Image (cartoon, rainbow, N blue to C red):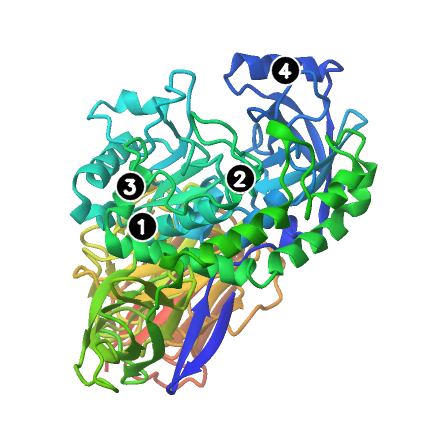
Amino acid sequence: MKKRFIFAGIVMGLFMFLGGQGFYDINTINELEITFAENNWDSILDSYYQAGDEERLTGSALINGVQFDSVGVRYKGNSTYNPNRIKNPLNIKLDHVIDDQTIDGYGTLKLANVYNDPSFVRETLSYEIARKYMPASEANYMKVTINGQYLGLYTSVQSVDKFFADTHFGNRDNAFFKGELTNDSPQNEVVVWGWLGDNEAVYADYYELKSDEGWPELVNFLDVFNNDQSEMEEVLNVDAHLWMLAFDNALVNLDAPVNFGHNFYLYQTGDGQFNPIIWDLNESFGIFAMLLGGAPLTVTGLQHLDPYLNENNSNYPIINKIMDDPVYKTRFIAHMKTILEENFDNGWYETRALEIQDIIDAEVQADPNKFYTYSNFLQNINFSIGNGPQQKIGITQLMEARTSYLLNLADFTADQPQIGIIECLPEAPVSVQEAQFSVHIDGAEEACLYHRSSEMGRFYETELFDDGQHDDGAAGDGLFANSFIANGLVLQYYVVADNADASAFSPARASYEYYTLNLVYLPTENIAINEFMADNDNIVADEAGEYDDWLELYNWSDESLDLSGYFLSDDPTSLDKWEIPAGVEIAAGGFLCFWADEDQEQGELHTNFKLSASGETIILTDPAGNVIDEITFDEQETDISFGRYPDGTGDFIQMTASFGAPNLDGVTENDNETIIAIPQISNYPNPFNPSTTIRFNITEEAYTELNIYNINGQLVKRLVSDNLKAGNQEMIWDGNNENGNKAASGVYFYNLSSGKYNTSGKMVLLK
């Protein structure tokens, strides 16, 4: 979602990922009916759980009336699972047997049985708050029935998987870990994010590998994090980490790495930084009320939990390596203040908790296997349920006192810098040229502008310098400015100001929220990403007859271009993901198509990445690393391409696919007939005068049409043969246009279609 703001004549976008739509819309209670062939399904699932190998029982699932076959089901959870319970947590893999079987892109469903939460809202409310500040799962509710037996109402939380990584980080195949303690982990001596030496095997007691590989990357990360803090930002998204620490502490989420060595993920983006991801918030708001190795906390102990919990504990490098840096420490406090002020100090959380309860009220009443009474459900927003170690503290009982306690601590009342209007000169900066940013800041000793030139990549720091001209003679009351080269098509940025006691961000939710400034792009080369299809079901087949994703480049210059050393990527953090092979050229006025299919053995024009039909980014980069063109797109329709009209310079629109040919103005009528690229095609001579011959081979008799276009995409000549025979054939263009007059000299391109076959090429007509 993008919000638009105007500051000092600059139009800037303020962005954050909100989610919460579709399958995980909080206002939707989904319904799941699972059917197993086995009547003793419960005992089978119990035996699988006890075996610990995550084996699944296969059955069918009906989700909101839609049938899913061959899904895999297992029990999950630690304290929330019990073989004597009817309502146990569930992990349901829709694509267990059938590849790519998903619902709205989600392949795994994770359902919690609300074992420890009388209010039923802790998990969904916590994730809703977290999504304002960091990548976090979507969450709502689901009614579950198995073999006709209604189990009750569950919370349904988005799995942190490759789809999640693709959504939030723009790629899915990098090093990916879950913080997961094993039976071999020393339960009372957990070292969270500790350096345990070079032996990768040791780390398997603390981390579960979720990607195909990644152990060397994790070991290197922990080595640098613990032993070379000057390089910490090279291996860790520090700001995202500060948000996670602030969130867990503010919400007293102690079943988390601030206290326990699990319930988090780590994903490494293409720029080398690991990004922490929160997980398993069902015991937030003080339900998990014990410090590791200690006694349960009292109500006051929960309310007054130290904001720097485990700061000096050597078993928690995850915290003390961060708090060692005074700037990180004040920025951590700034983030926690933002969370408290935006959600708790204003009472928003209580109102929202009651709204969520209204959505599920009837279903909670009807739940035959809930662990608390309906009266407990109504009471636990404001009051504790139970006593002693089993007490479930009321949410407002905890957070009203905790918010007051924290916001009155000296570190929270310290004077923060006040960040004013941010200005850029020129107001519409040109890509690859210098842009100067200035901002008025009161009370700052240092200030930085963090910026990046592509979606989802790393933010880089540029120091802003105080001009020394102060309003009242006080240090830090002045204009901070600096300039740098803004590369690419877009500039995303935020400002941080620090003094000895406090920090401030603009926008306050940075870096998950930031300003966006579109750059004026003056192309240095006449080449562009011209068209692509991210959901090719039955339109264009490659040489192997496979309907794969594809993208097209267009060269609108009058000279051919050698693409050796250029790169294509779908990952903004890895611009050199796939190098175009040496010797590949794109003709003057020509189109060149690449198959985005991760199948490079099929030919040199097959990339090492696929396109996501749910939306992502395509980037073209020159050998020097400059972004030549970039398109970020949303969800695509099956068998409809997305291309520029006019070619090369126009806006992207939906259109009927014109693979290797001039783009069309929108979607035209078609019979959805499969189009297969003609593998053998040539035209000779080229350049030519007065005529050229296009030679090709077709496998069946068919109506054949040859269309000639000029460089502006206008039809010049159409040649038709009603029943061209199978085999080697040719069609001749004599250089004349439709009026019979000689066409002007220059670059032309053709599109040849014969039955369900199609191909394109270019030619040059000489005087």
Residue linked to disc 3? 320
Check contact, mark 2 vs mark 3: CB within 8 A: no
Name the amino acid, label 4: Asp
* 85 over 64 or under it: above or below: above
Tell me where residue 369 appears, x and y as whole percent: 77, 29
Q: Circle 2 sits in a helix, a strand or a loop, which is it?
A: loop
Q: Which label is found at residue 46?
A: 4
In the picture, measured across the screen, residue 345 lies left or right of residue 14, that is: right
In the picture, measured across the screen, residue 466 lies left or right of residue 20, that is: left
| Figure quadrant of residue 180 | top left
Residue linked to disc 2? 159
Name the amino acid, label 3: Asn
Tell me where residue 522 appears, x and y as whole percent: 27, 78
Which numbered disc, 3 or 4, marks the residue closer to the eye? Answer: 3
Tell me where residue 229 appears, x and y as whole percent: 19, 45
Q: Residue at x 62, y 66 (%)?
A: 669
Mark nearer the N terminus (1 vs 2): 2
Q: Residues within 10 Å of mark 1 (few under 14, many from 20)?
A: many
Report if residue 276 is visible in the image: yes
| Figure quadrant of residue 410 | bottom left
* 414 over 599 or under it: above or below: below
Q: Circle 1 sits in a helix, a strand or a loop, which is it?
A: loop
Q: Which label is found at residue 237?
A: 1
In the picture, measured across the screen, residue 77 lies left or right of residue 604, that is: right
Check contact, mark 4 vs mark 2: CB within 8 A: no
Q: Measure the C-alpha gap from mark 2 to mark 3.
A: 29 Å
Mark nearer the N terminus (2 vs 3): 2
* 611 over 600 or under it: above or below: below
Tell me where residue 310 appears, x and y as whole percent: 35, 38
Q: Measure the C-alpha gap from mark 3 to mark 1.
A: 16 Å
